[in-house]
Image (cartoon, rainbow, N blue to C red):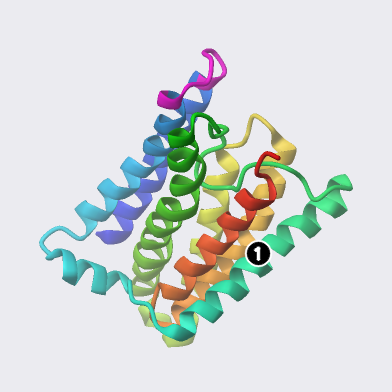
Amino acid sequence: MRLAWAFLGLVGAVACGWGVEMLSTTIASSPILEASAYLAVWIPLVAALILGLRGQRPREALTALGLRLRPLDLLWGIGIGCMGRAADAMLRLLAVGSTGASHAPTLSSVPASISPAAQTIVLGILAPVIVAPVLEELYFRGFLQRALAAAFARFGEVAKWSLAVVLCSLAFAAVHSLLLLANPAEALLTGAATLVFALAAGTTAAATGRLGGAVVGHVVFNGLGVLLTWPA
């Protein structure tokens, strides 16, 4: 049942994300629209988490998702975050001759406002660098990947986690790509880079049994993207 809720959450996130992206082509960008771009994809994911884990207390649910952090996870996270960002830069360099200058790939491609200061902090830093990594890792590596592993339990420990990591990573990359279909080249590059990161994050989460390394890695991955593209 958790796998069904996970699938419905993905469909809802993509559908709502597309809706906001289409709206952004017809009206001028505003803080409300920018915030809606994040909320449109976060709400279906949160709803799926709540429905899939209903009946459990918050602490039990977070434990079931593996939300724990150990000191070693900081090293794992920094490593996979830097690796993912390096892969993104290399892919762009090979494809278009430049490392690129776009916003860090979260679940929205609507540009974040950079003024006034409050909007910059919330939409330009907190949303992509803090909230998105935590929420996306809870959903993808904590919820979806574990649900997939449970579904493949009959294949054995190594096989079930291998399948779960690959399928979850493909779903993660696909969601990011699908929300950028208006720009096929960007969708392809973003999908490839997020797939590399997702495979590293998924493997780390599966090997450690914790989300700490994946969350830190996601923060580093998105944070470097924001830092490298921050307006002068």
Residue drawn 34% across and 67% down?
147
Residue drawn 13% across and 65% down?
56
Residue drawn 55% across and 68% down?
166
Residue that numbered label 1 is attached to: 84
Residue positioned most to the right: 97
Q: Which quadrant would residue 55 be assigned to in this image?
A: bottom left
214 in magenta:
no
Q: Is residue 208 visible?
A: yes
**Position of 64 compared to 179: left or right?**
left
Q: Which of these two is toward me, 7 or 57?
A: 57
Give residue 108's position: percent from left, percent from top: 51, 39
* Residue range (magenta): 24-32
Residue 27's place in the image compared with 156, above or below, is: above
Q: Is residue 156 visible?
A: no
Give residue 131's position: percent from left, percent from top: 40, 52
Q: Quadrant of the N terminus?
A: bottom left
Residue 150's place in the image compared with 126, above or below, is: below
The amino acid pointed to by label 1 is Gly
Q: Which of these two is toward me, 158 or 118?
A: 118
**Position of 33 compared to 179: left or right?**
left
Residue 175's place in the image compared with 167, above or below, is: above
- What type of secondary structure mainly makes up the magenta span? loop
Q: Quadrant of the C terminus?
A: top right
Give residue 145's position: percent from left, percent from top: 41, 67
Q: Which quadrant would residue 76 be assigned to in this image?
A: bottom right
Residue drawn 36% across and 70% down?
146
28 in magenta:
yes
Dot 1 falls on a residue whose secondary structure is helix
Q: Which of these two is toward me, 118 or 178?
A: 118
Residue 29's place in the image compared with 114, above or below, is: above
Give residue 73's position: percent from left, percent from top: 47, 80
Crowd around label 1: few <14 · some 14–19 · many ≥20 (10 Å): many
